[in-house]
Image: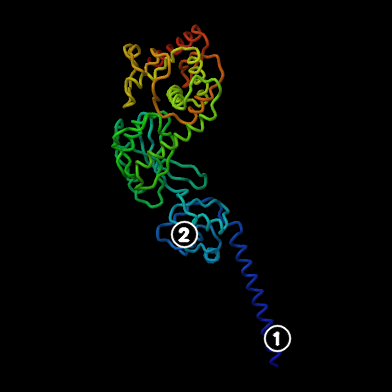
Amino acid sequence: MWRSIASNALTLLIVALVAMAGAIAWGKGQYTAQGPLESAICLRVQPGSTMTRVSRNLQDQGAVSSGSIFRIGAEYTDKMNQLKAGAFLVPEKSSMAEITDIITRGGASTCGTEVVYRVGVTRTDVLVRELDPATQSYSTVAEFYPDVTGNEATEIPAKYTEVREASDTRFRISVAEGTTVWRVIESLKGVDFITGSVEVDEMPAEGTLAPDSYEVKVGSDVDELIARMTAAQDKRLAEIWDTRADDLPISTPEEALILASIIEKETGIPEERREVASVFVNRLNQGMRLQTDPTVVYGVSNGVGFLGRGLRQSELQSDSPYNTYVIPALPPGPIANPGLASLEAAVNPDETPYIFFVADGTGGHAFAVTLADHNANVAKWRQIEAERAN
């Protein structure tokens, strides 16, 4: 009898163990299998949230089939207590394991709201943008102009005030190609989500702040941001200089930076940069003056403010070291912060015979080899200007 009871008990135990193993295997399969989410979502995890609360949210949004299995899987993989606050993009069909990794790995938020503080050549603005998880594209929901030099400030919208305090909002400072150091520093004075002073005793050297988009955290130090910009430009210039073409009429990285800044100010068309660079390289090789207006403008303004008018004859004939209508060489320093494409163009220009160019009315330029052809292109441009004035 006791032998029969023991045998039955052992059988039940084996059945139970097999059932448990099967349940565990099924649960693991559910945890790692493709999820039910039909389209991407933005999952917001508030500070102080628990995995239980998040799992319920995910189940309510149709991202997981079972909140319980999600929690058990997180516990089994030792990620139950690694939850990070933020806004996270959860792609369609994500498995529970993939979602767990997304919300526990840390780092910057990957979706939701972002504030972009844009430093432009002539003005600075602030955009509040929202990411559509389905299309993964941003749309602007609010915009204003901060109170900085050169701006006509506008009222700060309520939406900005709202997202400014949200824990999952991302913040970026974007610096456009062709800005001057003065413009960048003045604009940074209007950023209310970073700290520190930009009242520096000595401004960074012109051209040394890399145009780019910089993600920052609320309360981060402005001096550290400026150091990041400077380090980025140093790194770019060093790498670009190592790839330079042979027989260039420039002999140092500093001269490459100067030439790149002129290219940056002469054209906003990416496809033209190497062609414009070829004109300046050809002129330098032939001992010709560069005769470029942006350098003269910089000599007049010293990179401060925005000239906002045409050049006067007296300025075109001045003895300024930046007057390339007079000096037969590069100016003594950069005239703006050039971007990566202009740096690349400066050291690897196209091979062309061109020594002239002028605006063609489309935003680009007409190039010429001879003075006669150039004068014809200038006449066409003057006609376009006259027609636009009427």
Query: Which of these two is toward me, 228 or 220?
Result: 228
Q: For label 2, count other residues whose C-alpha is less than 10 Å away and answer few (under 14), some (14-19) or many (20+).
A: many
In terms of depth relative to the viewer, which is nearer, 306 or 338?
Answer: 338
Q: Which residue is mark 2?
A: 83
Does dot 2 land on a helix, a strand or a loop?
A: loop
Q: Position of residue 28 (x, y in %)?
A: 61, 64
Looking at numbered disc 2 in the image, what kind of residue is underneath it? Leu
Query: Relative to 70, is 167 above or below?
Result: above
**Which quadrant would the C terminus be assigned to in this image?**
top left
Considering every residue shown, the one lying at the far bottom of the view is: 1
Q: Is residue 155 left or right of residue 390?
A: left
Tell me where residue 303 appears, x and y as whole percent.
34, 26
Q: Residue at x 49, y 6 (%)?
A: 372
Q: Nearer the viewer, residue 54 or 312?
A: 312
Say whether disc 2 or disc 1 marks the residue closer to the N-terminus: 1
Question: Element type at marker 1?
Answer: helix
Q: Could you tell whether 130 is left or right of 187 in the image?
A: right
Kind of residue at badge 1:
Ser
Marking on residue 104: none
As displayed, is residue 349 above or below residue 175?
above
User: Disc 1 marks which residue?
Assistant: 7
- Work out which quarter of the rendered image holds the N terminus and state it: bottom right
x and y percentages locating residue 228 in the rendered image: 41, 40
**In the shown orientation, is residue 306 left or right of residue 25?**
left
